[in-house]
Amino acid sequence: MKRILALACASALALAACGTKGGGSEETGEGAGGVQAGVGVTDSDITLGVMTDQTGPFKNLSTGITHGNELWVKDVNASGGVCGRDVKLEIVDHGYKADTAKTLYPQIEPKVAGFVQVVGSPIMAALSSDLESDEATVTPASWSSELLGNPYVMVVGTTYDVEMIDGLSYLQEQGKIKDGDTVGHIYIDGEYGANGLRGSRYYAEQHNLNLREVKITSSDTDLTNIVTGFKGAGVKAILLTTTPTQTGSVAAANEALGLNVPILGNNPTFDPLLHDSPAAGALDKLYVVASSVPFSADIPKMKEVAGKYEKAGYSEPPNAGVPYGYAVAEVWGAVLRKACENKDLTRAGIHKALQETTSADTGDLVAKLDFSQPGAPATRQVYVAQPDASVPGGMKYVKPLFESPEAKEYQAPHQGG
Amino acid sequence: MSEIATKSPPEAPERAPSPKPRRDALWWVRKALWLVVLLVALALPLYLEAEWLKAGQYMMVGAVGAIGLTLLTGQAGQLSLAHAFFLLAGATAYTVLSGPTGDPELLGFGLDPLLALLGAVAISAVLGLAFAPVAGRLRGIYLGVASLSLVFLGLYFGQAAENLTGGTSTGRPPAEFSLFGFPFSNEGDLEILGVPIRETERVWYLFLALTVIAFLLARGAVGGRVGRAWRAVRDNEPAAAVMGVSVWRAKAGAFAVSSAYAGLAGVMTVLWFDLLKPDESEFGTYGINVSIAYLAMIIIGGLGSVPGALVGALLVNGLPQVLALYSTELGWSTGTGEHAFTPILISSFVYGAAIILVVLFEPGGLAAIGRRIAGRLSGKQRERNGS
């Protein structure tokens, strides 16, 4: 017994001899090229963080985004990097678990200048206050305008509420709905659904629509009874802020019940896999609004990225995450170059450069972005697309980038002034 | 950390405490070992970086909750899947009680954080007591399923009561904890041995204190009259009633105590996340997965064993975090593809395997293994004393 006691004491002593840790030292100083360097920036590298989901429910989309990020990094380093420095990614997997992300954050934070990708709304919510106090600029893989309350959040693309407003305005322009009509909105409770609902409520108020709201959870699969209810209420259109599976259920019920009204969905409601589902024949009434393009878009830049994806030899089938990830990284590149011009690559310098970025161009992968207004979506332009199994990627455009007058007037929740 | 189980085994809960505690060498060694564990825990913030402390704090959150559940399920024999609900109740109660007054959208009472913490524990206990009539009528798997309904109730209320919880889309930040004016934040300069004691270190000490209090109270309850009543009811209700134990009171008491522990763990959860955010689906911070994780902790640790619950929490709450941190530090598994073998994946395999192995080969859990080792050691000692 004494031996064990002695062993325990010895190990305690050994621990004590390990030396104490240093305090959080933030070295900033003049680096190469007379540029002020901050956390995550050395004379040769700029490191950006990626907190992604490689094992959880969103691993397909997240992996696509990560590959998009990686493709851009490869491109930019091949062309000499940013500010004379190579861009590197520090990738961690949190498995869509907020607790794991919360622990990983203090480990990755001192190594990176900012976060080019943070997946998951629970994770983003848990990290938001940390990111703000560390002044780290971050691009969440979510498009809720509620996130814009944190000034360090950079949402690449428009937000769910604006998508809804633009989409409704498109339906009205096409004569599919008119003032005073009844429309139904099915949404998933949470950041995503609540934000989409905010948009449809705004539009309904402007145009005196009678909005019937139905809240569901992300695990519901059969929505036939809701559509039956809508039929009884005489809706002229169905709005969706749901998962792709739920979109399929609604589309199938819409046809089966003979309701046959147009269905308007936010960006995440469609997945090319729907063309292989039982609802495949009923998708012709679906309109999807988004500010970023699908993988198969007929845009020169997209074709270039698609070619690179193929060459890179990734084993996963590509999805809309790839161009989005590439576009986000490209915007980051623009911001970093701006910071470099200002000779300030500290986190504060990067944030300042972000606010000075008024027209980030991604070759139309995403609409042109203006980050100068804190709290406001960086763009209010969207595409409208319809499912089409005959084209690669499963979607064809019915209306190019546009911004509706209602969306222009719309006041986002954290918009100043 | 397995030395906690192996070196300092718990007293067998089945064994009635002897009227005169044994004060032999082994008793002193046990006490000394607990002291060493405590000293190491006290010294860790001076050596570990913030991310490791964060992981450690999460283990302590689990430990407090698991101790509560092992009292209820292990000692009093009531299967409960409602632990996550009481976590949410405690978390919400703390945030509301300590929240600022006068917010048009969010209800707040502006209480002192310490009062709010005690209030949250009390509210959770009362809620547990309110469930007691159900707990008193059902047992076994029926009680488990009935208690599961509370998790769904919590899911609904978390989403519906936006003026309390802040709603699913943004949640609501809790008041920073402070003790008699000492803030558990980055404010003020405080150094121990040249190490700046900032938010993470301060919260570590707060959580450590809460865990120690929770642990000592649970040990006291298990060793005392209350614990004997719980075990009597668990083993045979009529026999317990004959011996003068009020079955109803014992069951209700166990539920209230366990809920209070879960409520405290809930308060620790919001302080750890710096956020109260109700779940969007059944899986989340207060979802079914959490109830099951707590069951896993007490099964791995050994039903009814308080130190076992500690070790179970270290494994279940700690392993994913520690593996993730280690692998990032060492640069393992940097793959990004579909088949990347990430630490999150490994840790789910490890803790799944741990449960299966425990149930197959040692239903008494790690506590039973610890007890056996202790038995062997004390046996040897007796031989030596005899010769």
Image: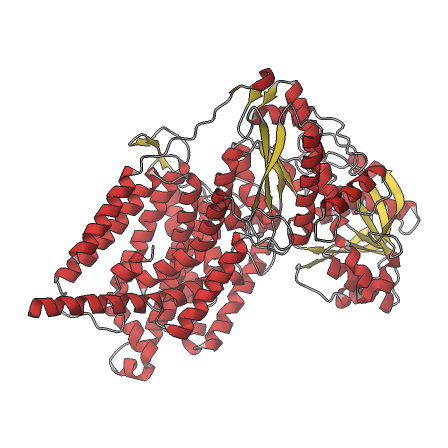
A307 is higher (above) or lower (below) than B359:
above
Q: Quadrant of the N terminus of chain B?
A: bottom left
Is A369 in front, or is B219? A369
Report x, y in % for residue B302.
35, 68
The residue lying toward the viewer, choosing from A16 and A96, is A16
Number of numbered tags placed on the structure image: 0
Q: Is residue A369 left or right of residue B301?
A: right
User: Residue at horizontal 81%, vertical 39%?
Assistant: A304
Left or right, B387 with reference to B329? left
To which quarter of the image does residue B29 belong?
A: bottom left
Residue A180 visible (yes or no) = no
- At horizontal 23% and vertical 46% (from top left) the residue drawn is A10
Image location of residue B43, percent across then percent down: 29, 42
Residue B170 visible, this orientation: yes
Query: To which quarter of the image does residue A368 belong?
Result: top right
For the C terminus of chain B, the image quarter is bottom left
